[in-house]
């Protein structure tokens, strides 16, 4: 199997994808004000670390092999069943990513741009990224991630005098009834674990290291973003659809003047990287579960087109998106995939050694 990327490139692209989800909230999921948001984030990532332990060990044991291929060698029926479930989950994840990107771009700097233009642009860039391959997309992800970190540093410098730590208060849990549901929802947003699960066979040595890097760095940056929201905006935070975009709008830097346009460009490119990685994850799912590498490459392009079409459908008919979103936010799909696939792969490899 050809190893195309390093674990650092995979981790950086996954962190970028997770931060994209954090910054592009959908209607009704505004970032809350208060210390509970910090506690929820830390608890959700701690839960993720525990749940993803089997994935960590499976990625370490497979030594670069596709987990689904390891399962397929022992049970094609189980591998096919898992492949179908993962494909459906990846398709919803990709369509949700496109939906978030469209809603974010058309609600902020490009509010007057027709939706069709947005999908044509994103679709063309996405198809090109899939055509260029995983290695080129990984490098792009690293560059965009670096641009995001630079953007955050500029914003911090511009907003430093506006930060008021006294807006934070010591109550770690404001509402006990909403705490657990918020933790579960936050946990469900870590769907990038499926990317590691499916792409670990494409990583040059130590693919398992991508997982703790992804969890640790994502958690720290999200906590930092939450700190900025709460200390700059205070109670207004809960009224903002896009706190990060609002930060970039009010951080008027002499060098760049208003950087909110750059902010939107960074997140749209982050969406393309995430969509491309999801398409590659689907490709490896088809290849590992059904053993058809040639068909998988063709289907990955079809996957991209269908995910964008579904995003457009969800935009026009939001009632079709809500039940799927509720299922995804329950944490059940991610929990099932993160536990079932690594456990099955480890059991199959253990059975092969005994045989």
Image (tube, rainbow, N blue to C red):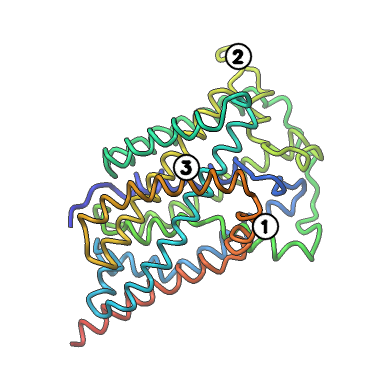
Sort mark 1 into few (<14), some (14-19) or many (20+) by Cα contacts within 10 Å. Answer: many
Of mark 3 and mark 2, the one earlier in the sequence is 3
* 242 on left or right of 297: right
Mark 2, residue position: 257
In the picture, the disc for residue 40 is 1
Tell me if residue 262 comes above or below residue 317 in the rendering.
above
On residue 16, which mark appears?
A: 3
Q: Are marks 3 and 2 in contact (CB under 8 Å)?
A: no
Name the mark on residue 325. Answer: none
**Nearer to the camera, 257 or 117:** 117
Tell me where residue 66 sits by quadrant: bottom left
129 vs 278: above or below: above
Number of marks in the rendered image: 3
Quadrant location of the C terminus in the rendered image: bottom left
Q: Residues within 10 Å of mark 3 (few under 14, many from 20)?
A: many
Badge 2 density bin: few <14, some 14–19, many ≥20, Cα 10 Å: few
Distance from Cα at disc 3 to Cα at disc 2: 25 Å
Looking at the image, the residue that sits furthest to the top is: 254
Q: Are marks 3 and 1 in contact (CB under 8 Å)?
A: no
The residue closer to the viewer here, 39 or 32, is 32
Q: In x, y percent, where is residue 297?
A: 26, 51
Label 1 vs label 2: CA separation?
A: 35 Å
Q: Quadrant of the N terminus?
A: bottom left
């Amino acid at each position: 199997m050809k190893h195309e990327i390093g674990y650092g490139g995979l981790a950086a692209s996954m962190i970028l994808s997770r931060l994209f989800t954090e910054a592009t909230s959908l209607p009704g999921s505004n970032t809350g004000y208060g210390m509970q948001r910090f506690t929820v984030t830390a608890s959700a990532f701690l839960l993720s670390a525990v749940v993803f332990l089997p994935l960590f060990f499976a990625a370490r044991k497979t030594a670069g092999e596709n987990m689904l291929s390891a399962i397929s060698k022992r049970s094609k029926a189980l591998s096919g069943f898992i492949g179908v479930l993962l494909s459906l989950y990846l398709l919803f994840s990709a369509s949700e990513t496109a939906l978030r990107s469209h809603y974010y771009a058309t609600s902020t700097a490009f509010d007057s741009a027709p939706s069709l233009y947005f999908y044509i642009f994103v679709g063309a860039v996405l198809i090109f990224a899939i055509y260029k391959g995983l290695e080129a997309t990984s490098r792009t992800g690293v560059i965009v991630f670096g641009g995001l970190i630079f953007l955050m540093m500029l914003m911090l410098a511009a907003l430093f005098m506006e930060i008021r730590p006294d807006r934070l208060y010591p109550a770690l849990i404001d509402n006990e009834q909403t705490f657990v549901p918020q933790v579960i929802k936050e946990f469900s947003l870590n769907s990038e674990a499926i990317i590691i699960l499916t792409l670990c066979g494409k990583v040059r040595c130590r693919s398992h290291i991508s997982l703790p890097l992804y969890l640790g760095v994502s958690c720290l940056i999200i906590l930092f973003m939450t700190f900025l929201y709460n200390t700059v905006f205070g109670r207004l935070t809960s009224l903002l659809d896009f706190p990060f975009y609002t930060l970039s709008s009010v951080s008027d830097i002499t060098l760049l003047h208003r950087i909110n346009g750059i902010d939107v460009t960074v997140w749209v490119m982050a969406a393309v990287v995430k969509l491309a990685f999801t398409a590659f994850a689907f490709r490896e799912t088809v290849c590992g579960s059904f053993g058809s590498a040639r068909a998988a490459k063709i289907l990955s392009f079809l996957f991209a087109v269908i995910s964008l079409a579904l995003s457009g459908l969800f935009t026009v008919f939001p009632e079709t998106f809500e039940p799927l979103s509720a299922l995804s936010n329950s944490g059940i799909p991610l929990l099932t995939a993160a536990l079932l696939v690594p456990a099955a792969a480890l059991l199959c490899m253990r059975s092969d050694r005994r045989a």
